[in-house]
C-alpha cells in the first residue's frame, strides 16, 4: 500500500509504503494499516488533531458512503467488510474509502491528464483493470456506488474465467496475469512486462506486435463505451500504460475503426499524468469532499 501526507492544497508533503503480504487475515491487515497510519503521522512530527482525515482506495466494488467493501476480485476473503467502521475505531480519525480507480479518476480529472474535460473514463491497467467515470463533471457512482467496473465488461460469449467469477471479462484478457501468461508463451518464462515494454519502445517488432494486440482488445472494449457515453476523454494509467506508443497507437486506431464517427472524432486518449501518485491524491480529494472542505 502507498501512503502519502497531503496539505490542504493536495500537494504531497511526504510518502511511504508498506507490504501487505505478511498479513494473513483481514483483521491483521486492518490492524497493520491502522498501525502504519499512526506511525506515519508521528514520523512527520504531527498530532492526530492536525489530520483532517484518511482516504483509502481499495481494488474492488465499495459502498463508499457506508464504508463497506463488497468484495475484492483478486484478493480472496474480503466480502461485506466494514473497513470504515473498523479503521475509524483503530485510528481515532475519520476514515473514508472508495474504489482505487475512482480515486485515480478524481485526481486525473481534477488536476491531471483530463483536467478541463467533462465526460471522462479513467482506467488503471494492472493486476486488475479498474475504471472510474466522470459524467458532466461529476464522479458517477451508480445506484449501489458500484459503477465504473470497466474491467468486467464481457468481450466474448465464452472465454477465460475472471477473478470476479464471470467469464471473458476484459480483465481476463488484459490484466497483468493474463498478459504475462501470453508473454511467457511468446518470449519465454523469464520475461517481464517491463522488459517487453523497453523492447517495444526500442522498436523490437515482436514486442511492438505484442502490445499492439493488447491495445486492440482494449480499444474494442473502449469503442463500445465511447459509443454509449459520447466521452470526450479516456485516461489510461497503471503499469501496463508504461508500454507506451505501441499500446496507445493501437488503442486510438481501434477506436477510430470501431467507434461511430461522431463519438470517435470527439474523444481524446491520454496517458495518466499523475503516475503512481494519482491514487493518494484522489484519496485526498475524497477526504475533502466528504468533510466539505
Image (spheres, rainbow, N blue to C red):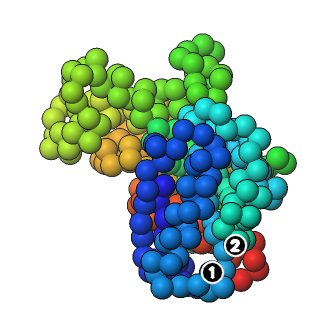
- Residue 87 horizontal/vertical position (percent): 69, 60
Q: Which secondary structure lies at badge 1? A: helix
Residue at image position (30%, 25%) is 183
Q: Relative to 14, is 108 above or below?
A: above
Q: Which residue is mark 2?
A: 93
Q: Which residue is more in the foreground, 41 or 196?
A: 41
Residue at image position (67%, 38%) is 78
**Crowding near pointer 2: few (<14 within 10 Å), some, many (20+)?**
some
Q: Which residue is more in the foreground, 76 or 107?
A: 76
**Crowding near pointer 1: few (<14 within 10 Å), some, many (20+)?**
few
- Residue 181 horizontal/vertical position (percent): 36, 23
Q: Is residue 265 left or right of residue 140?
A: left
Q: Which residue is mark 1?
A: 48
Where does the C terminus fall, quadrant-wise? bottom right
- Residue 96 horizontal/vertical position (percent): 70, 64
- Residue 146 horizontal/vertical position (percent): 74, 46
Q: Is residue 194 left or right of residue 287?
A: left
Amino acid at each position: 500500500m502507498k501512503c502519502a501526507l497531503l496539505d490542504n492544497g493536495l500537494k504531497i508533503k511526504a510518502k511511504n509504503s508498506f507490504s501487505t503480504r505478511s498479513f494473513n487475515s483481514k483483521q491483521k491487515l486492518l490492524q497493520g494499516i491502522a498501525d502504519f497510519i499512526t506511525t506515519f503521522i508521528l514520523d512527520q512530527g504531527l498530532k492526530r488533531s492536525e489530520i483532517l482525515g484518511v482516504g483509502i482506495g481499495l481494488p474492488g466494488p465499495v459502498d463508499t458512503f457506508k464504508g463497506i467493501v463488497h468484495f475484492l476480485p483478486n484478493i480472496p476473503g474480503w466480502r461485506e467488510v466494514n473497513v470504515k467502521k473498523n479503521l475509524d475505531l483503530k485510528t481515532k480519525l475519520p476514515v473514508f474509502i472508495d474504489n482505487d480507480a475512482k480515486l485515480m479518476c478524481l485526481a486525473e480529472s481534477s488536476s491531471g491528464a483530463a483536467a478541463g474535460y467533462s465526460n471522462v473514463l479513467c482506467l488503471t491497467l494492472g493486476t486488475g483493470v479498474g475504471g472510474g467515470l466522470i459524467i458532466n463533471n461529476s464522479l458517477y457512482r451508480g445506484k449501489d456506488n458500484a459503477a465504473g467496473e470497466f474491467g468486467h465488461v464481457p468481450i466474448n460469449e465464452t472465454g477465460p474465467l475472471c477473478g470476479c467469477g464471470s467469464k471473458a471479462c476484459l480483465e481476463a484478457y488484459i490484466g497483468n496475469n493474463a498478459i504475462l501468461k501470453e508473454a511467457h508463451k511468446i518470449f519465454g518464462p523469464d520475461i517481464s512486462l517491463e522488459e517487453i515494454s523497453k523492447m517495444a519502445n526500442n522498436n523490437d517488432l515482436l514486442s511492438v506486435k505484442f502490445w499492439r494486440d493488447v491495445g486492440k482488445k482494449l480499444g474494442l472494449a473502449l469503442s463500445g463505451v465511447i459509443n454509449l457515453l459520447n466521452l470526450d476523454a479516456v485516461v489510461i494509467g497503471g503499469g501496463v500504460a508504461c508500454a507506451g506508443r505501441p499500446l496507445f497507437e493501437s488503442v486510438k486506431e481501434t477506436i477510430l475503426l470501431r467507434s461511430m464517427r461522431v463519438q470517435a472524432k470527439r474523444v481524446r486518449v491520454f496517458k495518466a499524468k499523475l503516475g503512481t501518485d494519482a491514487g493518494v491524491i484522489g484519496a485526498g480529494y475524497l477526504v475533502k469532499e466528504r468533510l466539505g472542505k
